[in-house]
C-alpha cells in the first residue's frame, strides 16, 4: 500500500532528524538554548532543568522499541470532515496544515514492534497533530490496532498524548470513546494484555475511555493526567488547585496509575512489565 | 419584533381577555377563540423551525421535564439505590430499580433539581466521580439480574473539580462506557435535555439512543467551542449550528435512533404529555430489543459502535 511506504520513509527521515529541524532549541521552562543533538540524546528532556519536551509519535516509538523492529500498520480509510465544520478556519484547512507540519496523516501512529524482544502492538498519539485529539480517524485506527493485537495475540501498548475529543467532529468524536472501548473489550475477550502509558497531556475523552482501562498503567514523569484541564476547573469552580495537581505523582498518590517512570527509564520499565505480562518473548 | 416576542404579546392579550371575561362577565368567547387560534398557529411556526441555539435554550430550561419527578411519573414503582460504596453519593446522577409497564428495569438519570438548594447540591446536573462510580455499580446490579438498563440524560457535562479528579472521574466515565457496552440485556438511552460531552456518553453506549425533539447532544458546549475555536464566546449561536447538536441533525447523521416529538411549545409546557411520549417510545424500543437473543443483541451493539463514523452516515 503506497501510503504505508510513504509513511515508513517519513518515519525514517524524522528519526535521523530531517533537514527542516532547527539546530538549536530553546527550553520554555528555563530559557536554556540547547543543541538539538544534545536534546535528542537526552530523550528530549532539558539537560539543564529536566523539563520534558513533547515527543512526536515517531520519536516516541524510536525511544521505546528495539531498533528496526517497528512495522507500521496502515490507517484505515475514513470519511473526512464529516460535519463540514467551519470555525475561524475550515477544519479541512486545519487538517491540511497539521499534515504539512507533522508529515503524519492523522494524530495516531500504530504498528507492531519488539520491546526487549517482546512482540507488541502499539499505538502512539502525536500531540502536534491538532492536540492529539480523537476524531473518527484516530478512533478507527485505535480500534484496528486493538483488533490486530487481539488477533495476533500481542500485548497492546497505548501511549497517550491528547487534549481529548476532536471538537470539529462533534458527537462523532464522543462516539469514538465508545468505539475504542469496544476495541478494549476485544482485547479482553482474547485474553490479550493492555498497557497504557500516560504522558503530557492525558486528558478529556481519551483519558475518559481507553486511557483509563488498561491492565497496567504507567505515567511518564512530567505527565498531566486529568479529565478536565486545570484552566477549565479554575474557571468553572473557582477552586484553587493544590500544588502538584494532576501530575503523574498526583495520579499515583490517588491510586490512578501503577508507577511513575522517568522518560529515560520507560523502555526498561515496559520490558519489566512485559516480562510478567506477555505470554511469550 | 421576533416571532417569540409576538407570541408572548398575544399570550398576554389572551390572558387579559380571559380575566376581563371572568371579572366583568363579558362574553368574549369569539375574541378569545380567534386569539387562541392565532397563538397556536404562531407557536407551531416558532417551534417547527427553531435554530439550534434556541433549542439549546429550551434544553437547558430549569423546568425541563427530567430527573426524579420524570422517573416517578414514568414508572409504576422506583426504588433508589444510593452511594458508590467507596467515597460517597452524588445527588446529580441518581439511579435504582424500577417497574416500567410491569417490567423490572434499572434506571439511571441526571437530576438537576427544581429548588435552588437542590440545584446547588446537584451542581445543575453536573455529576462528579461518585455519580459515575455509582452508575457503574447499579449497572452491575442490573447485569447480575439480567435487567434492561434505561438511562435518562440531562447534564451540561461531568463536574470539573479538584475532588472529581482526585476520585478519578475520567476512570469512572470509562468504566461506565465499558460496563454499559458489555451489559447482558437491552440498554436504551434517552436524552431529555442537555447531553453534555463525556458526562453524557458515559450513559449512552446503548443499543438505542433516543432524543426529545429539543434535546441536545454535543462534544462541547456551544460557549466552550466558541471560546476555543472562535476565541469569542459571543458566537455561541454559530457554534451551536456548526456542532450539529440537535436531535434532527444527529438523526440525519444516523447517530441516534429516534426523535421523540415534544408538545408544541416545548417539553416544559406539558409535563405529562412529554412523559407519555417518552414512555411510548421507550417501551417500543425495549420490546424490539427484548425479542432478540442475547448474542444477536450484543453483536448488533458492537457493530453499531465498532466502526461508528468510519463508513459515512451510519444508516
Image: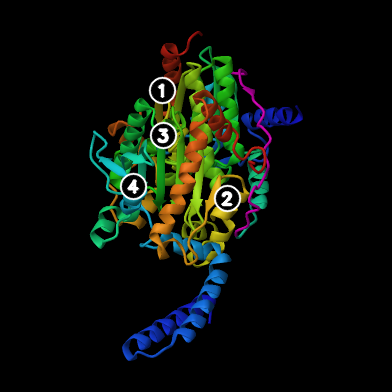
Mark 3 falls within which chain?
B
User: How far, Cα to Cα, is label 1 from label 2?
Assistant: 34 Å
| Residue in front for this viewpoint, A41 or B271 | B271
Residue at horizontal 25%, vertical 40%?
A: B82
Do callouts 4 and 1 point to residues on the same chain? Answer: no
Do callouts 2 and 3 point to residues on the same chain? Answer: yes
Is residue B69 visible in this depiction of the protein?
yes
| Badge number at residue B148 | 3
Marked residue nearer the N-terminal end (2 or 4): 4
In this rendering, the answer to whether B257 lies above or below B8 is: above
Q: Position of residue A223 (x, y in %)?
A: 41, 37
Marked residue nearer the N-terminal end (3 or 4): 4
Residue indicated by mark 1: A215
Do callouts 1 and 2 point to residues on the same chain? Answer: no
In this rendering, the answer to whether A117 lies above or below B93 is: above
User: How far, Cα to Cα, is label 2 from label 4?
Assistant: 24 Å
Which image quadrant for residue B230?
bottom right
Mark 4 falls within which chain?
B
Marked residue nearer the N-terminal end (2 or 3): 3
Mark 1 falls within which chain?
A
Which image quadrant for residue A102?
top right
Residue indicated by mark 2: B250
User: How far, Cα to Cα, is label 4 from label 1?
Assistant: 26 Å
User: How far, Cα to Cα, is label 3 from label 4?
Assistant: 22 Å
Q: Is residue B125 left or right of residue B210?
A: left
Is residue B168 visible in this depiction of the protein?
no
Magenta stretch, residue numbers: A66-87
| Badge number at residue B127 | 4
Q: Position of residue A7 (x, y in %)?
A: 69, 31
Amino acid at each position: 500500500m503506497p501510503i504505508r511506504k510513504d509513511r515508513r520513509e517519513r518515519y525514517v527521515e524524522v528519526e535521523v532528524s530531517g533537514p527542516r529541524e532547527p539546530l538549536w532549541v530553546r527550553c520554555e521552562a528555563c530559557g536554556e538554548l540547547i543543541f538539538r543533538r544534545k536534546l535528542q540524546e537526552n530523550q528530549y528532556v532539558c539537560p539543564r532543568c529536566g523539563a520534558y519536551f513533547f515527543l512526536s509519535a515517531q520519536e516516541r516509538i524510536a525511544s521505546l522499541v528495539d531498533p528496526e523492529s517497528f512495522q507500521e500498520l496502515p490507517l484505515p480509510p475514513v470519511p473526512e470532515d464529516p460535519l463540514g465544520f467551519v470555525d475561524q478556519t475550515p477544519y479541512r484547512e486545519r487538517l491540511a496544515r497539521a499534515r504539512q507540519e507533522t508529515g503524519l496523516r492523522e494524530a495516531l501512529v500504530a504498528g507492531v514492534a519488539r520491546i526487549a524482544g517482546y512482540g507488541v502492538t502499539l499505538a502512539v498519539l502525536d500531540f502536534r497533530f491538532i492536540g492529539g485529539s480523537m476524531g473518527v480517524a484516530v478512533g478507527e485506527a485505535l480500534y484496528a490496532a486493538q483488533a490486530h493485537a487481539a488477533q495476533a495475540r500481542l500485548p497492546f501498548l497505548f501511549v497517550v498524548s491528547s487534549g481529548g475529543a476532536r471538537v470539529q467532529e462533534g458527537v462523532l468524536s464522543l462516539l469514538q470513546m465508545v468505539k475504542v472501548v469496544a476495541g478494549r473489550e476485544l482485547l479482553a475477550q482474547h485474553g490479550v494484555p493492555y498497557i497504557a502509558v500516560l504522558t503530557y497531556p492525558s486528558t478529556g475523552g481519551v483519558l475518559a475511555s481507553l486511557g483509563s482501562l488498561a491492565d497496567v498503567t504507567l505515567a511518564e514523569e512530567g505527565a498531566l493526567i486529568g479529565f478536565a484541564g486545570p484552566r477549565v476547573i479554575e474557571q468553572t469552580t473557582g477552586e484553587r488547585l493544590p500544588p502538584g495537581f494532576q501530575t503523574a505523582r498526583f495520579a499515583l498518590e490517588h491510586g490512578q496509575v501503577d508507577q511513575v517512570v522517568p522518560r529515560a527509564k520507560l523502555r526498561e520499565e515496559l520490558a519489566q512489565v512485559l516480562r510478567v505480562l506477555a505470554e511469550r518473548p | 419584533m421576533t416571532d417569540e416576542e409576538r407570541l408572548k404579546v398575544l399570550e398576554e392579550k389572551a390572558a387579559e381577555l380571559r380575566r376581563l371575561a371572568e371579572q366583568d362577565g363579558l362574553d368574549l368567547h369569539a375574541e378569545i377563540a380567534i386569539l387562541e387560534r392565532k397563538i397556536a398557529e404562531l407557536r407551531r411556526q416558532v417551534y417547527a423551525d427553531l435554530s439550534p441555539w434556541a433549542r439549546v435554550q429550551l434544553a437547558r430550561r430549569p423546568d425541563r421535564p427530567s430527573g426524579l419527578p420524570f422517573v416517578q411519573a414514568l414508572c409504576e414503582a422506583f426504588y433508589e439505590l444510593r452511594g458508590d460504596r467507596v467515597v460517597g453519593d452524588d445527588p446529580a446522577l441518581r439511579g435504582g430499580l424500577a417497574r416500567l409497564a410491569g417490567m423490572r428495569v434499572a434506571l439511571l438519570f441526571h437530576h438537576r433539581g427544581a429548588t435552588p438548594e437542590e440545584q446547588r447540591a446537584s451542581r445543575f446536573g453536573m455529576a462528579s466521580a461518585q455519580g459515575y462510580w455509582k452508575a457503574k455499580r447499579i449497572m452491575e446490579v442490573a447485569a447480575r439480574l439480567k435487567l434492561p438498563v434505561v438511562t435518562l440524560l440531562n447534564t451540561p457535562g461531568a463536574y470539573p473539580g479538584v475532588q472529581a479528579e482526585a476520585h478519578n472521574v475520567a476512570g469512572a466515565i470509562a468504566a461506565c462506557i465499558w460496563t454499559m457496552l458489555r451489559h447482558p440485556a437491552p440498554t436504551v438511552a434517552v436524552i431529555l435535555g442537555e447531553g453534555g460531552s463525556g458526562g453524557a456518553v458515559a450513559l449512552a453506549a446503548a443499543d438505542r439512543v433516543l432524543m426529545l425533539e429539543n434535546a441536545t447532544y454535543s462534544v462541547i458546549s456551544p460557549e466552550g467551542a466558541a471560546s476555543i475555536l472562535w476565541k469569542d464566546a459571543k458566537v455561541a449561536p454559530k457554534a451551536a449550528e456548526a456542532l450539529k447538536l440537535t436531535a434532527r441533525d444527529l438523526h440525519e447523521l444516523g447517530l441516534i435512533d429516534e426523535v421523540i416529538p415534544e408538545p408544541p411549545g416545548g417539553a416544559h409546557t406539558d409535563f405529562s404529555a412529554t412523559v407519555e411520549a417518552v414512555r411510548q417510545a421507550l417501551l417500543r424500543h425495549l420490546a424490539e430489543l427484548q425479542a432478540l437473543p442475547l448474542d444477536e443483541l450484543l453483536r448488533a451493539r458492537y457493530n453499531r459502535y465498532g466502526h461508528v463514523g468510519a463508513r459515512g452516515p451510519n444508516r
